[in-house]
Image (cartoon, rainbow, N blue to C red):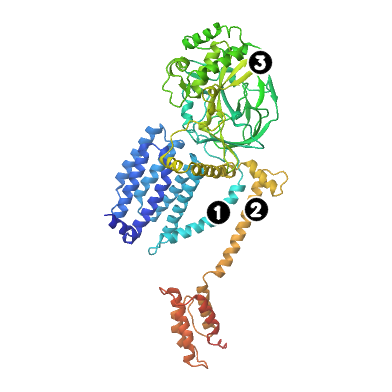
Amino acid sequence: MLNRLAGRLSGQLPRDGRDTLFLLAVIGWILLPQVPRLPLWCSLLAGGVLLWRGWIALGARPLPSRWWLGALLALTLGLTLMSHRTLLGRDAGVTLLVSLLALKTLELRARRDAFVVFFLGFFTMLTNFFFSQSLATAAAMLVGLLGLLTALVNAHMPVGRPPLAESARHALRMAAIGAPIMLVLFLLFPRLAPLWGIPSDAMSGRSGLSSTMEVGNLASLALDDSIAMRIRFDGQPPPQDALYFRGPVLSEFDGRQWRQGRGDFSFNTAPQRNLQLAGTPTSYEVTLEPHNRPWLLLLDVASRRPELAGLSALQTQDLAWLANRPITDLVRFRAQSHTDFRYGPQRRTAELQGDLQLPAGSNPRTLALAAEMRRDPRYAEAGSAALVAAALDRLRTGGYSYTLEPGVYGEHTADEFWFDRKAGFCEHIASAFVVLMRALDIPARIVTGYQGGEMNAVDGYWTVRQSDAHAWTEVWHAGQGWVRVDPTGAVMPGRIGSLDRLRAPQGAFATAVGNVSPNIAAQLRAAWEAVNNRWNQWVLNYTQSRQLDLLRALGFEAPDWEDLGRLLIGLVVLASLGGAGWTLWDRRQHDPWLRLLHKARERLRAAGLAVPPQAAPRQLAQLLVQLPAVAAGPQQLAPLRDWLLRLEAQRYARAPALELATLQREYQRLPWPPPSSPA
């Protein structure tokens, strides 16, 4: 059966069947990236319809009736409404579009239907970029674009059975001709919000930090090895153990969940109070991946407002920076930060009371531990620094471990960590530590963000992943203010600063490559991420400000979007004039065989022969006998007759014996009849 199928595909299949199977394969390629984002029924429906249509094409079977199509359309609308609760919006629209594209293939009866499928395919191809603008997605859709262009070109070749390879060459040529136009439009078309960009919900499914932290949820981020942001430092970067990228600060606790306090969202309209900076600031550039949250995740304390194109940055009272809207697409900005700083009130005030609160009846054994420590003569009169050191020493020497799988914690999370499980991820450790500090009457809170990262040796960027998500604590000391304390470092020192991370299980291919050569696996990964970073920097992050920078480099003093429009229009006019000139030149240069035949017609017409305008070479050879009497005999016309027949053979023979250049040279030496004298 496989041999019979291979034979049909290789040449016995009619052209309609072959072209249909090729188009179905291209559509399947375009729909494949959508499968993880579509409802299961939609993927099954689209795949089943494409296979059904392929089966029809292979057997030259009749297409289903319109009753079938009507029933499937009604089913599609009903299931879409059930899945998305609407027929509008991005997700519902993509589901409908994919389903309708698949169903339309069951109506491929004429070229008109094929053209509808082509253009539906082009539109469906674009919807992939609603969800991902990565280099891999762009490369896959480029293949899909060339496939659709090949099918479109092939549909305009109605005669015979043209090879698909020939249609593919024409499609590739068309794409190559259009590439410079596309590049100019990409560089110069004004990027005016909100007309430019992707839908605001395009990245709604991305994982990232939240304004709340339930004990155990950061461990899920540690299983995500995707990139959260890339950093390029202007000079020498700070030590790796000093790389704390600050996110939400959590101060309210209900026993299981930490959230931002009510006052944490107040923004600074003046320089930060009680903030003392020391040392030289670190300048750097951040390329922040979409995470559908407003957090900007700067290194420690940014002393100045970050420079964001098209966004405003606001600083909260706890030194976190937020954008004025969620980050739903790639954002690049510059910032300056200090890793040596002190902030917060120097003496206990009423504003610290919120950082001492614990829910009633929660974690009684931790409260008992705090009371026991207070009764210990060593700590009876000790300050907060000594109590913090004692708690860290307990973590260091008490048999506690750092793990992604500590088990499910119950109601009293701090009690279970300190006395029962003695195992947890960073949020388990930080939460239990803050509960103990508050039980000791020491203001404390949790800070979430990212810690560490790794240098990509290929492009020099510092890569911070979702697996670098971290939770640490801030403890208030009299006379010092808020001081960072990372209790995870006491349990597992290698987690802070080094590359000693708990890794998620890798796939079979990555595991196999890593087992063969860990260095090769690391180098391949670094090279691929460096290429992706270049794509992010030069394509996804090509903003209006970079367009204006390009105009400045071209000599514009104070460019704006109107200059972009004028330059673009000027280039379009020049390109149009160039295209018109090329068309005129190409019309004269088109088909040297036809030009040579035209010259032969004109020579014979000048000799007095009545030559029809579209006479073929063989017809001209037959008309030679009608020439007026000439001095030469008919034997001298034999070379001319032979040349005309060879000109025809050069064009239409299966294996032409002569090259056209040879016939062109012989044309000059032929005994053409002299022009006839006018009557």
Say whether marks 1 and 3 touch (CB < 8 Å).
no
Report whether residue 589 is seen: yes
Q: Which residue is mark 3?
A: 345
Residue shown at 43%/60% (left/top)?
Answer: 165
Q: Amino acid at mark 2?
A: Gly
Q: Which residue is mark 1?
A: 179
Distance CA(mark 1)–CA(mark 3):
60 Å
For the residues carrying marks 3 and 2, which lies nearer the camera in this image? 3
Distance CA(mark 3)–CA(mark 2):
61 Å
Percent position (x, y) of residue 169?
47, 60
Q: Which residue is mark 2?
A: 570
Structural crowding at the residue carrying mark 1, measured as other residues with C-alpha within 10 Å and reported as few (<14), some (14–19) or many (≥20)? few
Q: Looking at this view, name the residue that lies furthest to the left.
A: 1
Residue shown at 62%/59% (left/top)?
Answer: 577
Decide which of tag 3 and tag 2 comes sooner along the chain.
3
Task: Determine which of the numbered discs, if any, sits on residue 211 in the image.
Answer: none
Quarter the C terminus occupies: bottom right
Name the quadrant containing residue 32: top left
| Viewer-nearest residue: 478 or 192 | 478
Say whether marks 1 and 2 touch (CB < 8 Å).
no
Callout 3: SS = loop
For the residues carrying marks 1 and 2, which lies nearer the camera in this image? 1
Callout 1: SS = helix
